[in-house]
Image (tube, rainbow, N blue to C red):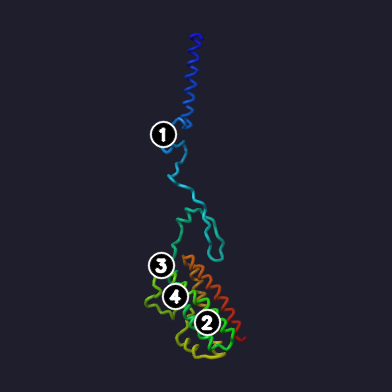
Amino acid sequence: MTGRQARVWYAVTVLAALLVLGGLALTGRGDTRPAADRPSPAGAVPSPAGSVSAPPVLVPGRPGESAATRPAAEVRDAAPPRWNGLDVWYVRMMIPHHEQALEMAKLAPERAADPRIRAVADRIRAAQGPEVGVLRAWLSARDLPAEVAGHDHATMRGMQSADAMRQLADARGAAFDALFVRMMTDHHQGAVVMSTDLLKVGADQAMQEFANAVAVEQSAEITRMRALLPS
C-alpha cells in the first residue's frame, strides 16, 4: 500500500468511528449514566417516580339511575364523605319511628278481627324489628349516640299521638281493624316522606339503599292496607 493510500484509509476509518460514536450519543446507548439521570428527549414530559395510570372506576348511580365510568383520579378527588349529618339525623329519627310501628303491630294478634290485618302486623314486625337493629348498629359503628337530647319525636311525620295509641290499645274487632289501618297508613306515609327526602341529600351508600327499601316497601304496604278497608 502506498503512503497516499494509507492516508486515505486512515481518514475513512476515523470518519466511520466518528459516525458510530455520534449515533450512539443520539440514541443514548453510548451514555453510561443511569436512565433516571439521562436528559429527557426534546418535548418529552417526565412521569413522576413510581406513578402508574389507574384504571377507570365504575360509579354506582342513585336508586333508579344507571352506573357511570369515570377516571379514578376524578372519583378520588370528588368523592363525597362517607356519611353526613343528614344521614345521622335520619337514622336517629327512624329508630323511634319504627319502634312505634312495632308497638302498634304487637296489638293486632289479640285485637284484630280480620286475619289479614294480623298478617299485615306480622309482616311489619318481621321487617321493622331487624331494621331497628341495623339502624342502631350503623350508629354504634360510628360511635354516635342514638338519642337526640331535647327532641320531641311526636313532631315527626306520621308519628301517632299518645292519645291515639291509647285508643288503638282499647279498641277491639272491626273497630280496631279500621283504626289500625288508618293509623298505620299515616305512619307509613311519614316514613316514605322521610326516606324520600334522605335520597336527595344523604351521602352514605348503605343508608341510601336502606331509605330506598323503606320507601318502596312501605308504599306497597299502604296499598295493601287500603285494600282491606270496606269500600
Mark with earlier residue (2, 3): 3
What is the x, y in percent for residue 225? 58, 81
Mark 3 or mark 4: which is in front?
3
What is the CA distance from the residue labelled 2 to the residue labelled 4? 17 Å
Q: Residues within 10 Å of mark 2 (few under 14, many from 20)?
A: many
The residue at 47%/88% (across/down) is: 166
Mark with earlier residue (2, 1): 1
Q: Secondary structure at mark 2?
A: helix
Image vertical order of residue 186 relative to residue 34, above or below: below
Mark with earlier residue (1, 4): 1
Image vertical order of residue 161 relative to residue 2, above or below: below
Quarter holding the C terminus?
Answer: bottom right
Q: Which residue is mark 4?
A: 93
Image vertical order of residue 111 relative to residue 139, above or below: below
Name which residue type carries label 2: Met
Q: Residues within 10 Å of mark 4 (few under 14, many from 20)?
A: many
Q: Which residue is mark 3?
A: 142
Mark with earlier residue (1, 3): 1
Q: Which residue is mark 2?
A: 184
Q: Residues within 10 Å of mark 3 (few under 14, many from 20)?
A: few
What is the CA distance from the residue labelled 1 to the residue labelled 4? 67 Å
Q: Secondary structure at mark 1?
A: loop
Mark with earlier residue (2, 4): 4
Q: Which residue is mark 1?
A: 33
Q: Residues within 10 Å of mark 1 (few under 14, many from 20)?
A: few
Name which residue type carries label 1: Arg
What is the CA distance from the residue labelled 2 to the residue labelled 1? 80 Å
What is the CA distance from the residue labelled 1 to the residue labelled 3? 54 Å
Name which residue type carries label 3: Arg
